[in-house]
Image (tube, rainbow, N blue to C red):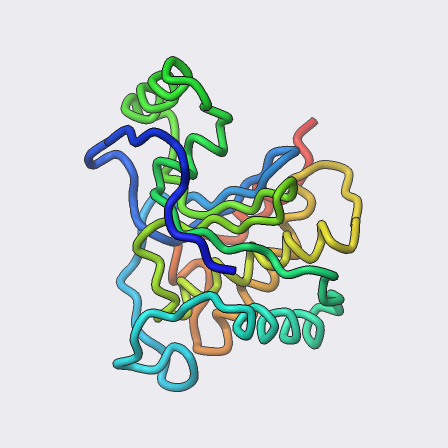
Amino acid sequence: MLVRGLMLPAIVASGLLGGPGGQYPTSEESSVGVVERVTQQRPAETGINAPGAGPVEPTDALLAEIEQWLKVHFDLSPGNRRPTVAIVSATDILFLRYKAFTEERRREVLASYARGHGRSVTAMYDPRTATIYLAEGWTGRTPAEMSILVHEMVHHLQTEARLSYACPEESEKLAYAAQEKWLGQSGRSLESEFGLDGFTLLAASICVH
């Protein structure tokens, strides 16, 4: 099911939040996509990312296709339920990530980002509601954008399978591997599309405590 918009009071942070793409550190309750910069992205030559194609709707059929791809390449079993996909503002995802549910907390979060103490939040999986949140502007037309959905689908299937990890960051290793393989099908990589090198990926997928 696709949902557009989120019932959170709107707070405008002009110029603060960026577009789709990025890294995915986790908390105990969610996996969040962030990015410092987005490189120029080229559409793939075939398939759902073909040149001239319109925005891709994250339908059940598309999610089933991604599930099957993850099963074939990473032995992840399809879940008992498909996630809801919500297209919302990057600001709303930011507030969800930092549990900013009061006006005071939202102001604190935005002030922190304005001081350069954070990166733009672009995607998130919430296991409590089985919802993938994608930032407005996501179209799925490029391999990079589609890889974001693939990454969050990994977290959904990890949750459905009740896989356990020593820390939330450890679950990122598989999600990054799937994202990298998806990009590799069109000659791209996490580094070429998002500037994520091996050291950055390692740091984002190991336990720090």
Q: Which picture quadrant has residue 35?
A: top left
Judge by depth and name the residue closer to the eye, 34 or 184: 34
Quadrant showing the C terminus: top right
Residue 202, percent across and down?
A: 60, 46
Residue under the point 40% across and 62% down: 145
Residue 180, percent across and down?
A: 53, 64
Residue 154, percent across and down?
A: 63, 58
Judge by depth and name the residue closer to the eye, 84 or 141: 84
Q: Which picture quadrant has residue 205?
A: top right
Residue under the point 55% across and 55% down: 84
Relative horizontal placement of residue 75, taking residue 110 as reference (left or right): right
Residue under the point 68% across and 47% down: 171
Q: Residue furthest bottom?
A: 46
Q: Is the residue 108 above or below the residue 67 in the image?
A: above
Q: Residue furthest left?
A: 14
Relative horizontal placement of residue 8, taking residue 177 as reference (left or right): left
Q: Which picture quadrant has residue 106?
A: top left
Q: Residue furthest top?
A: 104
Residue 75, percent across and down?
A: 75, 69
Residue under the point 28% across and 24% down: 114
